[in-house]
Image: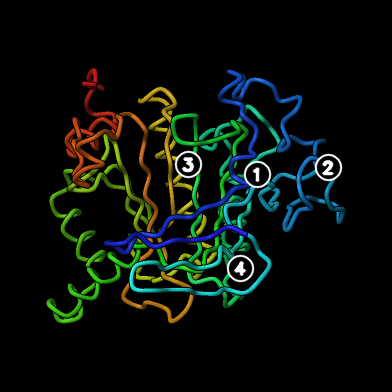
């Protein structure tokens, strides 16, 4: 059984999961992403994964070809779905049993596809699958937070190049989310009930220096204090605490702007490795002042000793320049290393 342990000093938790060490060593063999013949996510290889928990296909079959989106439990999960959540603690040592869920969202049957090159219909189906699995997992009261995320490329931590995302439901609310909630609560109290993210969108719209693109329901921007080169946020203009509350028509707009920004990064930054993740309200006791959003962090610079030792970041690209480059108004310079 995996285990979560809390840092002595900070509110940081570490997941210890032996099954993660059993993942295929594709990086060590130098074959990452080159051989679809033994890829468990490719069409026709459905027997290489655990039974699916969701699939979109025309016929009513299961666990066979003919799908365009497929969701399966991770064969090497960080957290295990069976058992009860137990908390143990002394003055210094705090731990929680690693109960949770870890699923894979296979985004396309084609091993060589890229999310930005998929059709709007397909990207919309991916977003629909995210929501469908989120809604199912949120019913389990053992889970306090659900993270939807994507690792693209070896540098971003992907162990398989077939386009896929992941969902992890966990028994602890991550420190980053707790800090964001506290910041939103402080702003709410100090600004006569305003939402911090709504105010950010208002101010960024007025300055119009860091906006990359927008549509009817979302704004894509380079944040004022971006930690990483070309870090980008997608923020809904309507105030909603949780991703699951987004109506159908807004999910279409979300899929469209996500596809657009990933396409810009793919073309301008030459298919960079990246991570993206959806930050949403915790599952229990909805944080109504929260404002859900998606963050994209390309892996263009290394996180080294200074960053790890201080939690400060050195970013060689000003967010105003990053936004202009992603808008196509400025040519990409050579990035310092």
Check disc 4 and report the residue beneath it. Answer: 137
Instruction: Give the mark nearest the N terminus, 1 or 4.
Output: 1
Measured Cα–Cα span from mark 4 to mark 2 = 24 Å
- Pair 1/2: label in front: 2
Q: Which element is circle 2 on?
A: helix
Quarter-of-image position of residue 260 = top left
Q: Which mark is residue 47?
A: 2
Check disc 3 and report the residue beneath it. Answer: 259
Measured Cα–Cα span from mark 1 to mark 4 = 17 Å
Measured Cα–Cα span from mark 3 to mark 1 = 16 Å
Front in this rendered view, residue 242 or 46: 46
Residue drawn 66% across and 39% down? 108
> Is 92 placed above or below 312 here?
below
Q: Which element is circle 4 on?
A: helix
Q: Which mark is residue 139?
A: none
> Is 148 placed above or below 274 here?
below
Quarter-of-image position of residue 265 = top left
Q: Which element is circle 1 on?
A: strand
Instruction: Please report contact status of discs 4 and 2: CB closer than 8 Å, yes or no.
Output: no
Instruction: Give the mark nearest the N terminus, 2 or 3.
Output: 2
- Pair 2/3: label in front: 2
Residue 50, image x, y percentages: 77, 50
Measured Cα–Cα span from mark 3 to mark 4 = 25 Å
Residue 290, image x, y percentages: 33, 71
Measured Cα–Cα span from mark 1 to mark 2 = 14 Å
Instruction: Please report contact status of discs 2 and 3: CB closer than 8 Å, yes or no.
Output: no
In the picture provided, is 28 more to the left or to the right than 108? Answer: left
Q: Residues within 10 Å of mark 1 (few under 14, many from 20)?
A: many
Check disc 1 and report the residue beneath it. Answer: 106
In the picture provided, is 25 more to the left or to the right than 47? Answer: left
Front in this rendered view, residue 143 or 61: 143
């Amino acid at each position: 059984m995996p285990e979560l342990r809390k840092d002595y000093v900070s509110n940081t938790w570490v997941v210890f999961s032996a099954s993660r060490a059993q993942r295929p060593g594709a990086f060590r063999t130098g074959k990452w992403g080159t051989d679809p013949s033994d890829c468990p996510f490719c069409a026709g290889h459905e027997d290489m994964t655990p039974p699916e928990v969701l699939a979109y296909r025309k016929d009513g079959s299961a666990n066979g070809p003919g799908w365009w989106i497929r969701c399966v439990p991770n064969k090497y999960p960080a957290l295990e779905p069976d058992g009860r959540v137990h908390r143990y603690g002394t003055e210094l040592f705090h731990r929680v049993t690693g109960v949770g869920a870890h699923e894979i969202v296979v985004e396309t049957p084609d091993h060589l596809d890229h999310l930005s090159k998929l059709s709007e219909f397909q990207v919309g189906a991916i977003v629909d699958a995210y929501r469908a699995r989120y809604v199912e997992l949120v019913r389990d009261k053992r889970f306090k937070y659900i993270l939807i995320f994507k690792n693209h490329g070896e540098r971003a931590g992907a162990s398989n190049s077939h386009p896929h995302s992941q969902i992890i439901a966990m028994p602890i609310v991550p420190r980053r989310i707790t800090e964001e909630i506290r910041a939103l609560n402080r702003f709410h109290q100090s600004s006569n009930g305003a939402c911090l993210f709504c105010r950010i969108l208002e101010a960024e719209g007025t300055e119009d220096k860091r906006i990359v693109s927008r549509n009817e329901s979302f704004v894509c921007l380079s944040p004022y204090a971006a930690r990483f080169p070309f870090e980008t946020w997608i923020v809904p203009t309507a105030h909603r605490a949780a991703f699951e509350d987004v109506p159908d028509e807004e999910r279409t707009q979300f899929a469209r702007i996500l596809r657009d920004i990933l396409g810009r990064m793919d073309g301008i930054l030459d298919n960079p490795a990246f991570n993206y993740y959806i930050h949403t309200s915790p599952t229990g006791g909805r944080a109504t002042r929260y404002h859900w959003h998606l963050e994209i962090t390309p892996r263009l610079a290394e996180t080294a000793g200074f960053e790890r030792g201080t939690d400060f970041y050195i970013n060689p690209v000003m967010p105003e320049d990053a936004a202009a480059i992603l808008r196509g108004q400025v040519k990409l310079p050579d990035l310092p290393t």
